[in-house]
Image (cartoon, rainbow, N blue to C red):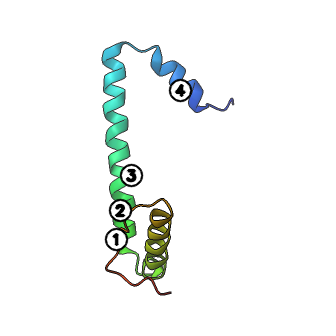
Amino acid sequence: MSRLTLADVLTQARQLPLAEQARLTTILDRERSLRLVALLDEWAADESGYEDEAWPQLQATLDAERERLGMSRLFADRDHSV
């Protein structure tokens, strides 16, 4: 059994009539949307506390990089103490 690659699928898809390509794109877009919703649901249900630990670090890093580039801070009203 040969292994099907993404390149193989794309090559075959490009050979479809335009109407079929549009239908395939619609199906793939719907599948992507469903996967994104599932990922967001999983993320929203996460109670590990990771974001409580990581978010202040991310804010501090973003603000430090913006200041380095001469830009205003995004989170100027926040203390980034960690």
Real-space Cα separation, disc 3 to disc 4, in angstroms = 20 Å
| Marked residue nearer the N-terminal end (1 or 3) | 3
Mark toward the viewer: 2 or 3 = 2
User: In the displayed structure, would residue 37 be above or below residue 16?
Assistant: below
Residue at horizontal 34 percent and vertical 14 percent from the top: 18
Give the residue type at disc 1: Ala
**Quadrant of the image occupied by residue 72:** bottom left
Residue indicated by mark 4: 9
In the rendered structure, are the residues bearing label 4 and label 2 in contact, judged by CB atoms less than 8 Å apart? no
Q: Earlier in the sequence, mark 3 or mark 4?
A: 4
Residue designated by label 3: 35
Residue in front for this viewpoint, 47 or 16: 47
Please indicate whether residue 70 sits to the left or right of residue 23 in the image. Answer: right
Residue 35: percent from the left, percent from the top? 38, 52
Q: Nearer the viewer, residue 26 or 71?
A: 71
Figure label count: 4
Inter-mark Cα distance, 1 to 3: 14 Å
Q: Are marks 2 and 3 in contact (CB under 8 Å)?
A: no
Say which amino acid is labelled 3.
Arg
- The quarter in which the N terminus is drawn is top right
Look at mark 2 in the image and give the residue it sits on.
40
Residue annotated with mark 1: 44
Q: Earlier in the sequence, mark 1 or mark 4?
A: 4
